[in-house]
Image: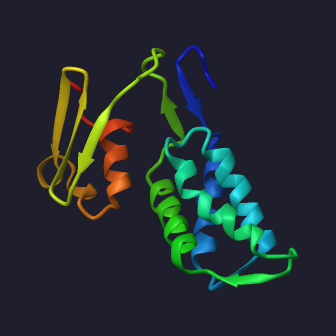
Amino acid sequence: MDSTTLELRLPTTKLEQLRQDLADFQQCKHVSKKQLQSLAGKLNWASSVVRGGRVFLRRIIDSITKLKHDWHKMRLCGGILHDSHWWYNFMSTFNGKFFLLNTDPVTSVYTDACKTGAGGVFGTDRFYVNWKEDFPLAQTLHINEQISICIGFGGPALG
């Protein structure tokens, strides 16, 4: 945490290692309890900087409890696979920094998104994003990633 620049930051070397670990994980068909524990620990650490990251960590953690011993394996599919894909896709563009722009707590921000765009309201301020015109690369992303782009990672300013 850098209190001068008001940013949370992941060290570059650890960020690159996490990206590589996620790429390796994507190639697995079966994973052991030990592999899941290792990945969950690293993603939990990264979640301190990645807003909303814990949402995509819960199913991985839950799957760990289903395996009795460290060497027991499970097929990589379903929710765990989707969550690991989210992390992999997000980490491929994440620069390891999160800016603390406002130290005042936000009490209510309302957002919604669909295939064509997204919008949000905070108090009397509002924004709208057309994916095709404003963020063409975001058109194919999961809706949670699209909302993150708008409200947390450099989306249009409210107003």
Residue 114: percent from left, percent from top:
21, 56
Viewer-proximal residue among 84 and 106: 106
| Above or below, comparing residue 91 to residue 59 in the picture | above
Quarter location, residue 71: bottom right
Is 35 situated left or right of 77 in this image?
right
x 61%, y 21%: residue: 2
**Up/down of 39 relative to 66, above or below:** above
Q: How was this image coloured? A: rainbow
Q: Residue at x 49, y 70 (%)?
A: 82
Taking 54 as reference, is 17 left or right?
right
Q: Residue at x 15, y 57 (%)?
A: 116
Which residue is located at x 38 percent, y 39 percent? 153
Callout count = 0
Residue 127 image offset from top left, x and y in percent: 18, 33
Report whether residue 157 is seen.
no
Q: Position of residue 18 (x, y in %)?
A: 64, 56
Asked whether, in this view, residue 18 is left or right of residue 103, the answer is right
Would residue 40 be seen by someone viewing this image from the given angle? yes
Quadrant assignment for the N terminus? top right
Give the position of the C terminus as an image quadrant.
Answer: top left
Q: Position of residue 62 (x, y in %)?
A: 68, 64
Q: Nearer the viewer, residue 158 or 136?
A: 158
